[in-house]
Amino acid sequence: MIKKTDIVREAVREGDFKKALRIAKGFRINITVADRDKMSRAYECIVHPEFYRQIGTDIPKAIAEGKEVVSRLYGA
């Protein structure tokens, strides 16, 4: 049986951060609220950039923070 964490690790290894963030943003065990928020915000900025641009979010920074968190937690 393939676990979601294994899918996330594989996506990070392949550089598919959209897929990795889509799955990992819902994880709760051993992840701080701040880390989960960064992953969620990064995914949302990837999927809905125009909305986050309208509310004044620094999109590249938010995405970079989310990538850093998912790489730190699930990178090889």
Image: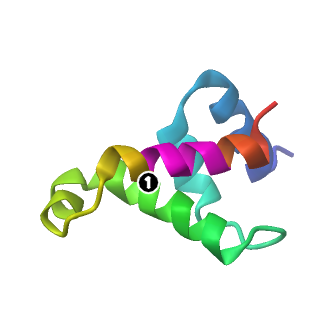
Going by the numbered disc 1, the residue's amino acid type is Tyr
Q: Which residue does the image show at 79% across and 42% down from the upper left?
A: 6
Picture coordinates of residue 72 (x, y %)?
74, 44
Picture coordinates of residue 5 (x, y %)?
77, 49
Q: Nearer the viewer, residue 33 or 22?
A: 33
Q: Mark 1 Cα within 10 Å, few/some/many (few <14, many 20+)? A: many
Vertical position of residue 67 compared to residue 62: above or below: above
Residue 75 seen from this side: yes
Residue lying furthest bottom: 33
Q: Which residue does the image show at 15% across and 55% down from the upper left?
A: 50
Confirm whether the magenta stretch covers residue 68: yes
Picture coordinates of residue 28 (x, y %)?
73, 73
Horizontal side of 60 relative to 23 (left or right) equals: left
Please count the marks in the image.
Answer: 1
Residue lying furthest top: 14
Q: Which residue does the image show at 56% across and 43% down from the upper left?
A: 67
Vertical position of residue 19 compared to residue 55: above or below: above
Q: Which residue does the image show at 53% across and 38% down from the upper left?
A: 17
Vertical position of residue 38 compared to residue 33: above or below: above
Q: Secondary structure at mark 1?
A: helix
Q: Quadrant of residue 43?
A: bottom left
Picture coordinates of residue 35 (x, y %)?
64, 64
Q: Quadrant of the C terminus?
A: top right
Horizontal side of 49 relative to 40 (left or right) equals: left
Per the rendered image, the range of residues in magenta is 63-69
Confirm whether the magenta stretch covers residue 75: no
Which residue is under mark 1?
43
Q: Nearer the viewer, residue 23 or 40?
A: 40
